[in-house]
Amino acid sequence: MKTKLLTLACASLIFVACSDDKNAQVKQLPPQPVSIMTMQSANLPLEFTYPARLSTELDVIIKPKVSGEIKAKYFKSGQAVKKGDKLFLIEPDKYQASVNMAYGEALVSRASFDDAEKNFKRDQILIEKNAISQKEFDASLAKFNSTKANLESARAKLANARLDLKYTVVSAPFDGVLGDALMDVGDYVNASSTELVRITNINPIFADFYISDVDKINMNKNIQSGNWQLENIQVQANVGGELFNGKLYFIDSVIDTHSGGVKAKAIFDNNNSSLMPGSFANVHVEGFVQKDGFEIPQVALLQDDSATYVYTLVDGKVVKTVVNVIYQTSDKAIIDKGLKNGDKVILNNFKKIRPGASVSVMENK
């Protein structure tokens, strides 16, 4: 029995001794190697990227303003035209005849009015001399007023007839590119309903996109506080890998209930017709500048349930430093609070270090 107890005691001593040796080895592990970046504040440019779709503000289906048979077509499908270029001709002879008839009616009305006016002026003198009765004068006045109204009506009818004659020539309402002709010579068209051809103005062209509500709120807040500066806002569109420079054209003042964002437009010159309405693009908005910010790689940014933070190096030890991220992309983050000039932010080896641990600097970026 004594022998067994002695054996157990020896084994316990050996186990404790081994444990002490292992603890000693853990405590004596060398500092973990890390790379660091020394912080220096700067005015940092910010860029925002949004998906967009190209559009044009002038895109219409042309319809005739008069009814009749198309007598001529002056264009080819896909042709570029200028404002005022002739596109179709619709029965001008019929509308010229209407003008002639209205003109004749206007002449008759004018003659009747001239006669009534002459008689009325004479009767004005006679009534003052009691040379005619009041009834005769009233009849003269009524004749004058009715012929005057008839003349005005005839003039209006003539004006409308001339306008209809003008509308027999269907012209391009603005510079643009024509689509395929929807009607041709010999077709009968109805005023305001028959579709003739589509015309689209593709210069300039617009990119429609939505700024996220979070981005818009941050923009407003930081611009108003002076935290962000605006320096010549520029827009660049990436369309199929090709870049096009433009300008910010419009930002709405309300949040769109369907998209949850704020509608915006950018405008681009399209003199060479490289951009087409309906194409998809990525729009990059530049010109916002963060004052006195600190830029760090996205990989250096850490997060737990309570805060966003980085590891900094202070006297050879790891320190957890809570920061405020004002802007970030997939590869970088910009900090406006929590860091100061000269701080050393740790960039890697996060799985092997903890606050309070000793580290050795392998690289200072």
Image (spheres, rainbow, N blue to C red):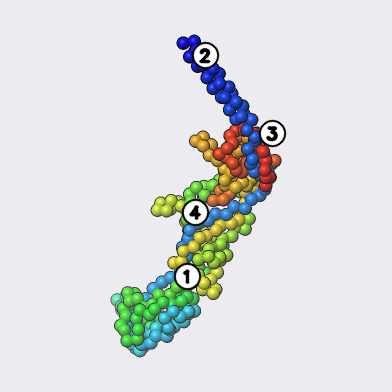
Q: Alpha carbon of mark 2 to alpha carbon of mark 1: how far?
A: 93 Å
Label annotation for residue 276: 1
The residue positioned 55% from the left and 69% from the top of the image is 269
- Which of marks 2 and 4 precedes in the sequence? 2
- Which of marks 3 and 1 precedes in the sequence? 1
Front label number (4 vs 2)? 2
Which residue carries the number 2 mark? 6
Q: Residue 231, percent across and down?
A: 63, 55
Quick check: marks 2 and 1 in contact, CB under 8 Å? no
Q: Alpha carbon of mark 4 to alpha carbon of mark 2: how far?
A: 79 Å
> Does residue 42 appear to the left or right of 203 in the view shown?
right
Q: Residue 80, percent across and down?
A: 48, 79
Label annotation for residue 211: 4
Front label number (4 vs 3)? 3
**Mark 1 neighbour class, 10 Å CA radius: few under 14, some 14 to 19, many 20 or more:** some
Q: Is residue 199 above or below residue 31?
A: below
- Which amino acid lies under the numbered mark 2 shown in the image of this protein? Leu
Label annotation for residue 315: 3
